[in-house]
Image (cartoon, helix red, strand yellow):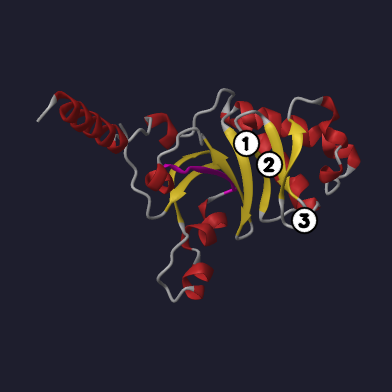
């Protein structure tokens, strides 16, 4: 085997082995913010109130790696609103689903959550799920990595998320979108997909 073939062979082995390394820091499996848990819980609770009042459901909002705020418009398309730190973002028409008097509060709350590793919110089965520490991409293992924060008074409040009987029934019991609790601090629950493999590096 000549040197060129050996080099290609070694490079292929290195690529395959690096792709198989699973990176999942332990702190993603526990609730851990920059600020204290009570402050983050209070911010999530206030956001939930804003969303409920304005009947905002399904995909609610998201922030990308460049801190661009995006949201689903009335036609169902995902649209960029603008830079999260831009003071004029509160005047954008895409935020018209929020009362004018509460838009500044909305932006400040999501800025605060963004600093605490929460970058997106979706509505599912009557609950607002906040995407937590979504800073690792692992291709076909991504589902194992996804973590969500949910605000609830107790576990009973999120039973329908943990079981998701509607999804089971809709797919003949073969498709399970349910979640499992992997950590809890007061009124905040950290969820992973029920069938997710919880592994650490």
Q: Can you identify the residue that label 1 sits on?
A: 41
Which range of residues does the magenta coloring cover?
144-153
Cα distance in 3D space between marks 3 and 1: 21 Å
Q: Report helix, strand or loop for mark 1.
A: helix
Which residue occupies the foreground of this view, 141 or 10? 10
* The C terminus lies in quadrant: top left
C-alpha gap between disc 2 and disc 3: 15 Å
Q: Residue at x 43, y 48 (%)?
A: 143
> What is the x, y in percent for residue 62?
65, 41
Check contact, mark 3 vs mark 1: CB within 8 A.
no
Query: Which label is found at residue 101?
Result: none
Residue 189 location (% of width, % of height) = 52, 43
Instruction: Kindly identify which residue carries mark 3.
Output: 55
Kindly report which numbered mark, 2 or 3, lies closer to the viewer in this rendering.
3
Name the side, left or right, on which 104 lies relative to 129: right
The residue beneath circle 2 is 45
């Amino acid at each position: 085997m000549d040197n060129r073939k050996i080099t290609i062979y070694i490079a292929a082995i290195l690529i395959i082995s690096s792709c198989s390394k699973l990176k999942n820091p332990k702190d993603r499996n526990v609730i851990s913010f920059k600020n204290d848990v009570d402050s983050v819980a209070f911010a999530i609770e206030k956001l939930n109130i804003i969303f409920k009042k304005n009947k905002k459901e399904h995909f609610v909002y998201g922030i990308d790696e460049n801190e661009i705020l995006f949201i689903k418009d009335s036609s169902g398309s995902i649209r960029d609103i603008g830079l999260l730190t831009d003071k004029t973002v509160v005047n954008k028409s895409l935020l018209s689903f929020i009362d004018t008097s509460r838009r500044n509060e909305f932006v400040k709350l999501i800025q605060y959550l963004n600093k605490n590793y929460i970058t997106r919110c979706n509505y599912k089965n009557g609950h607002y799920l906040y995407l937590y520490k979504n800073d690792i991409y692992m291709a076909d293992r991504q589902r194992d990595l996804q973590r969500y924060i949910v605000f609830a008074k107790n576990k009973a409040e999120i039973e329908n998320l943990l079981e998701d009987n509607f999804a089971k029934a809709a797919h003949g019991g073969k498709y399970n979108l349910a979640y499992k609790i992997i950590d809890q601090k007061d009124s905040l629950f950290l969820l992973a997909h029920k069938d997710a493999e919880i592994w650490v590096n």
